[in-house]
Image: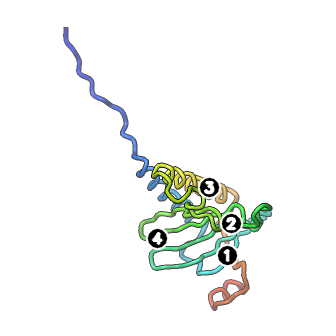
Amino acid sequence: MIQLRTTDTRTPHASRFAWLMALYAENFRRIQQVVDLAALDEGRWCSQVGDGLDLHVDVLARHRYMLELRMSYAFADPATGVPEPSAYVRVYLDACQAEVTHCYVGQRWQDVLGTHPPAHTVFAHRLQMNTFLSKWLEHLRGAGHGRGWLPAEPATSPLLAQVCSA
């Protein structure tokens, strides 16, 4: 009797780390559809689409290869008083990646997970936060955000003054 040798034809799957890095790349692509990363200077910016949920983006810092953003709606959580939902996002322009660093004011991962969480707990938390960002960005794009930005604060620089008068 002839025996046939079969080969394992399963599709290779990405490691958990590769999955997270792919999510960061997807978040970068999605955030580019909602926020004009090259045009916004430091300050607070607002996108209004007429649904009563104005998206506020604070450009906290602009570095040569990185942006630090805070994205939120203009309403506060009744229990804490902080903007809800709210995400602090670090955008790596050279690597084309965007990651959530934390989701609430004062809630770093140490505040949420403790001072010495196991690595798999930290990883799961990062995955959860960045999945939230991906879904939120998809929702924002579907709602029409990303077509026009207005300064949410009074103009403080010549560039902002130009935008305000336009």
* Kind of residue sitting beneath label 2: Ser
Q: Are marks 1 and 4 in contact (CB under 8 Å)?
A: no
Q: Which residue is mark 1?
A: 45
Instruction: Give the residue type at disc 1.
Output: Trp
45 displayed left or right of 90: right
Report the residue marked by disc 3. 138
Closer to the eye: label 3 or 2: 2
Disc 4 marks which residue? 93
Q: Marks 2 and 4, Cα distance to the nearest angstrom?
A: 21 Å
**Mark found first going from the N terminus, 2 or 1:** 1
Mark 1: few, some, or many residues within 10 Å (few <14, many ≥20)? Answer: many
In this rendered view, identify the residue nearer to me: 125 or 152.
Answer: 125
Please state the horizontal and vertical placement of residue 162, each as a whole percent of the image.
66, 88
- Quarter of the figure that contains the C terminus: bottom right
Q: Nearer the viewer, mark 2 or mark 1?
A: 2
Q: Identify the mark at residue 94; answer none if there is no mark.
A: none
Mark 3 vs 4, N-terminal side: 4
**Pointer 2 residue:** 72
Q: Mark 1 or mark 4: name the one nearer the start of the chain.
A: 1
What residue is drawn where x is 60% and y is 54%?
Answer: 132
Rendering quarter of residue 68? bottom right
Give the residue at x 47% y 63%: 97
Q: CA distance from mark 3 to mark 4?
A: 20 Å
